[in-house]
Image: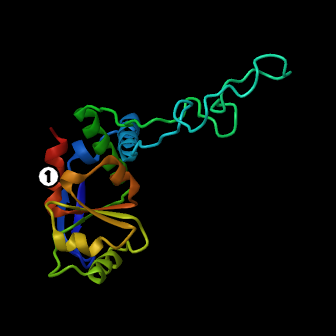
């Protein structure tokens, strides 16, 4: 699969790169994608929720009325879950929502996500660029040149670039990651992927294992 290479001004450099069919042109496995996205979202949950049960709420343990003869149900404590202010039955407890997925499945999910984006023609390859200093305006100019100013975009760098990252940090619709930080969720959550040339070899190397 050949894709033309643009510069950061959105102009064609006249060069093309070959994207690996084993990464960008496979038959997407929707179930693998579902599981990987589910794991990512589960890992974002803090799991610190807690409700007080009968033994934990404040209140007297004195029997509030006699057992028989009242014409109503027997009751032993104001902490009874049936009463206002009583404990919660089977309430949430602190827990971890994380679960394990095999590395092979996660690689398949990322390749499927890349293939989906490639099929939709939502992948742009841009030659490596840098800024002299962090500057949000410069990054916005890059987005405008690529026609992405009003779209959710994911920029994938080959290696960490502090100036580019800091330039994008204030923009809600744009995200900058390195190839090692890629996730299936991040790929699918963006409308367009902007792959810098330096990231292509690393992406294909990581996903071809």
Looking at the rendering, which quadrant does residue 162 occupy? bottom left
Count of numbered marks = 1
Residue at the spot of label 1: 202
Helix, strand or loop at disc 1? Answer: helix
The structure's colour scheme is: rainbow
* Residue count near mark 1 (Cα–Cα under 10 Å), binned few <14, some 14–19, many ≥20: some
**Percent coordinates x, y for residue 38 in the rendering:** 40, 40
Residue closer to the observer: 194 or 105 = 105
Viewer-nearest residue: 110 or 51: 51
Residue 119 appears anywhere in the view: no
In percent of width and height, residue 1 lies at 24, 52
- Direction from residue 158 to residue 97 in the image, left or right: right
Give how far across and how far down residue 202 sits, in percent: 14, 52
In percent of the image, x 28 and y 44: which residue is there? 111
Residue at 71% x, 24% y: name it. 75
**Residue 15, placed above or below residue 136:** above
Extreme top residue here? 68
Q: Nearer the viewer, residue 71 or 97?
A: 71
For image coordinates 39% across by 46% down, the residue present is: 46
Question: On the rendered structure, is 138 left or right of 191?
Answer: left
């Amino acid at each position: 699969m050949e894709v033309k290479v643009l510069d950061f001004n959105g102009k064609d450099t006249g060069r093309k790169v070959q994207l690996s069919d084993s990464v960008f042109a496979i038959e997407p496995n929707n179930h693998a994608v579902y599981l990987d996205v589910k794991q990512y979202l589960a890992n974002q949950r803090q799991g610190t929720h807690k409700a007080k049960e009968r033994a934990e709420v404040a209140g007297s343990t004195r029997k509030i009325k006699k057992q028989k003869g009242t014409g109503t149900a027997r009751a032993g404590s104001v902490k009874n879950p049936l009463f206002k202010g009583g404990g919660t039955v089977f309430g949430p407890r602190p827990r971890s929502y994380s679960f394990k997925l095999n590395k092979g499945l996660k690689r398949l999910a990322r390749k499927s996500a890349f293939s989906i984006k490639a099929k939709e023609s939502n992948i742009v390859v841009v030659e490596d660029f840098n800024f002299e200093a962090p500057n949000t305006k410069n990054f916005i100019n890059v987005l405008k040149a690529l026609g992405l100013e009003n779209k959710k975009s994911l920029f994938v760098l080959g290696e960490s670039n502090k100036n580019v990252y800091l330039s994008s940090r204030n923009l809600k619709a744009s995200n900058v990651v390195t190839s090692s930080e890629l996730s299936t969720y991040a790929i699918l959550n963006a409308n367009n992927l902007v792959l810098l040339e330096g990231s292509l070899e690393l992406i294909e190397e990581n996903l071809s294992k």
